[in-house]
Amino acid sequence: MKLNFVTVDVFTGTQFAGNPLAVVLNAKGLTGGQMQAIAAEFNLSETSFVLPPQDPANTAEVRIFTPRYEVPFAGHPNVGTAFALAREGTSYGRAVDSERVSFEEKAGLVPISLLKDAGAVTGARLVSP
């Protein structure tokens, strides 16, 4: 299986600073065990996995793993995943809204507002579930 991923430096404008995050953009078909193994291989504080949403009104289902276990919610993976999807422009063939995204997670629905500067996405603001 070929996986597309990006790495994002969250909470900074400087490359290789801030909180690093790996975002697997096409996790459909991966088992939880495979996601855990991939997160361990990246060995970052968290790795997020983007799946198609259960409810088409939402942007994506997102699962978040540390190198050792899955977590129901975490702030910096949501900010980084929203940023990555906004920069990609699509998620599973659907356009990503340029103002807001919503993620289905173990902890519940996570609404996220995208932040922009001169039309470019620069970050995200969220409300925890």
Image (cartoon, rainbow, N blue to C red):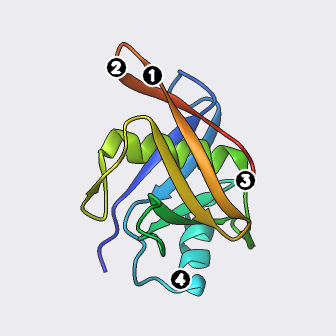
The span from disc 4 to disc 1 (Cα, nearest Å) is 34 Å
State the residue at coordinates (48%, 47%). 101
Look at 43% across and 35% down and name the residue there. 99
Kindly indicate whether the residue at mark 1 contacts the one at mark 2 (C-beta within 8 angstroms): yes
Amino acid type, mark 3: Ala
Dot 4 corresponds to which residue? Answer: 34
**Quadrant in which residue 3 is drawn:** bottom left
Q: Amino acid at mark 4?
A: Gln
Q: Nearer the viewer, mark 1 or mark 3?
A: 1
Query: Residue 119, image x and y in percent?
Result: 34, 19
Tag 3's secondary structure? loop
The quarter holding residue 37 reads bottom right
In the rendered structure, find residue 119 and report the number of the disc placed on it: 2
Dots 2 and 4: beta carbons under 8 Å? Answer: no
Is residue 6 or residue 127 the one in the foreground?
127
Q: Is residue 110 left or right of residue 1?
A: right
Q: Quadrant of the N terminus?
A: bottom left
Q: Farthest left residue?
A: 93
